[in-house]
Amino acid sequence: MNLADFIEADLDGIIDDWTDYARAISPADSHLQDVQLRNSARELLLGIAADMRVSQSAAQQEAKSHGERPDPDSTFNQIGRGHADDRQAHGFGINALVAEYRALRASVLRRWQRTGSLDITACQDMIRFNEAIDQMVAESVRQFAQRTERIRDLFAGVLAHDMRSPVGAILNSAQVVLRDENLAPLSLRATTNLQRSAERLKLLIDDLFVFTRVRLGDTLPVEFTQQDFGRLCRGVVDEVLAARPDAQIETQTAGELTGVWDAARMNQLIANLVTNAVQYGSGMVRVKAAGDGQQIVLTVSNEGAPIPARALPTLFDPLTRADPLNDSARASSGVGLGLYICRCIAQAHHGTIGVESDEHATAFTVKIPRFPAKA
């Protein structure tokens, strides 16, 4: 008896083994009923048996072994995704999900071996069976991971959104207090520190909010209005100097710097680059903006130790950060979203961002069209 036929013939016995094991590893508060466990196992096993009966060429078998998915929306793959959704809804972790498949594989092969009816085709049957199990595991894990990431992104997005209001209230209150000319020196310093910390927190929250929106599949919202890029650069530099009066920042502008951009996003991009240069570099930070008839080129450079070459390929990826000075205290001041946000903003304006770093300087270069709305 071939393996596909055996699975269907011994379906109830295999399901009994499955149910016992799934019950043993299920969370105490999952409230999974035996009928749910049995129905899930039946659907998986029948799907695997059906897949094993589909004719398959050597090229198709090799492609499957390499993880290719010729039809992601096939019934077979949908069964794997559905099982992942079901287990996640009942509190299973991803390790328990994989353990179920491991136990199912062992149970089927062990019970089949006991029949003693293995013939010359048994090896090919086992290959097809293992292929089916592996594909089902991959589909379930993929679905489980995607749903888990989405839940985390939704949580982070809601958190970032809800934190905007109290941070805005802190900033507004600090500005009101600072208008009082009768503040004692100690109160003035404390309120100024409060304002600077709230502004820094607002930048982090804005980065987190953009990150979660992009991760959840939403396009980065941009509102194009007429702007002066040189004025944007000078405004950001003034804000950074207000927060870091010890910083050395030089601003240079040249050429045609008017265009159509989202002012808030451009401020965010420039602020992230300048803040990074001040925080992780040393010496003079140079902000240069040059424009021509087609595009604006922004360069933010700083002196100091170079970014390690190994970090450059993933420097603009989310939740990564290269600390050239290996200073753990400085490295802990951000969550590794700033450069990722810069790339998102540049792309939303049909532009690009890149970096060059050596022992002389580290320079980030942003190129954006003057009129990206028409690009």
Image (cartoon, rainbow, N blue to C red):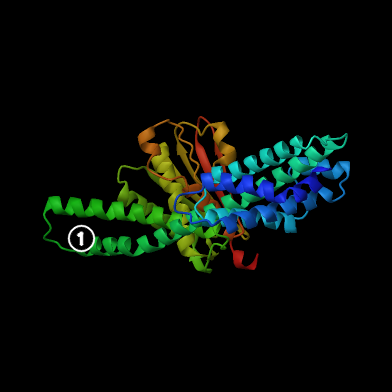
The reply to whether residue 345 is in sight is no
The reply to whether residue 323 is in sight is yes
State the image coordinates of residue 120 (x, y, percent, origin top left).
88, 34
Name the amino acid, label 1: Leu
Q: Is residue 215 above or below residue 317?
A: below
Quadrant housing the N terminus: top right
- Seen at 38% across and 33% down, the residue is 328
Mark 1: few/some/many CA within 10 Å (<14, 14-19, 20+): some
State the image coordinates of residue 41 (x, y, percent, origin top left).
65, 52
Residue underneath mark 1: 178
State the image coordinates of residue 238 (x, y, percent, origin top left).
36, 54
Q: Is residue 86 above or below residue 275?
A: below
Is 333 on the left-hand or right-hand side of 357?
A: left
Which of the two residues, 280 or 337, is positioned nearer the viewer here? 337
Q: How many marks can you see?
A: 1
Which of the two residues, 48 or 319, is positioned nearer the viewer here? 48
Instruction: Identify the secondary structure beneath mark 1.
Output: helix
Quadrant housing the C terminus: bottom right
- Seen at 71% across and 39% down, the residue is 111
Is 33 on the left-hand or right-hand side of 173?
A: right
